[in-house]
Image (spheres, grey):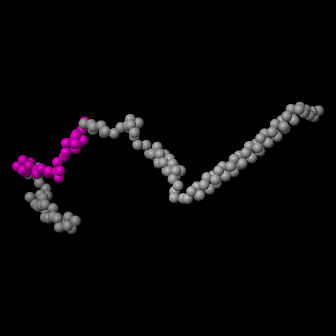
Amino acid sequence: MSKRGKIDIGGLGNAAEERPVAATPAQNVSQTASTPPPRVKPESEPTPQAEKRASPGRSYDPPPRRPRQERKNAFDVGSWLIEGVLGIAEEVRHNDLGLPEEFWTHAYAARREALLAARALIDTALERFDEEDDASARREAGRRQRGPVNVNFD
């Protein structure tokens, strides 16, 4: 039986074991009968959970998770954000932010003036709308008084 020499793999100096190149089937049978192949031991023995997962036909245990609708007080991002924004608005509304009282007096007065200005714009727009509505009603009343005009081209 011929043998190969040692082979350097990857230049690391690790030589592969010497192995027979080709053996006849009779040699293979006699070799396997006399010496069983070495058992390759895995680096870590499988845990019972891993064996349970690996075995076919067995199902997983159901996870302890439940949908949000089935859990009381489940976390909801939308309501959490709304609650945070409302909390910040409430804090700003009741906090003086370190500004003097005179500032807040004028700020509230300015807010009132801005609302009065908006009210004046709305009142003016309503008056114009009423005037246009009255004008169109007068035009329609005039049309009804005159009656239809018939023109014949005979």
Name the spot of residue 10 as percent of width and height, x first. 22, 65
**Screen quadrant of the C terminus:** top right
Name the spot of residue 34 as percent of width and height, x first. 5, 49
Name the spot of residue 143 as percent of width and height, x first. 86, 35
Please say whether residue 138 is visible from this viewpoint.
yes
Please say whether residue 85 is visible from this viewpoint.
no
Name the spot of residue 55 as percent of width and height, x first. 22, 40
Q: Quadrant of residue 12?
A: bottom left
**Screen quadrant of the N terminus:** bottom left
Q: Quadrant of residue 16?
A: bottom left
Q: Is residue 69 left or right of residue 101?
A: left
Name the foreground residue: 133 vs 123.
123
**Relative to 45, residue 56 above or below:** above
Q: Is residue 110 magenta?
A: no
Q: Residue at x 49, y 46 (%)?
A: 82
Q: Residue at x 35, y 37 (%)?
A: 66
Q: Residue at x 14, y 51 (%)?
A: 40
Q: Residue at x 85, y 34 (%)?
A: 141
The magenta span reads 28-57
Kindly give the residue lying farthest to the right in the view shown. Answer: 154
Q: Quadrant of residue 153?
A: top right
Kindly give the residue lying farthest to the left in the view shown. Answer: 34
Name the foreground residue: 58 vs 90.
90
Q: Is residue 32 magenta?
A: yes
Q: How many marks can you see?
A: 0
**Relative to 95, residue 137 above or below:** above
**Relative to 59, residue 124 above or below:** below
Name the foreground residue: 95 vs 90.
95
Kindly give the residue lying farthest to the front in the view shown. Answer: 101
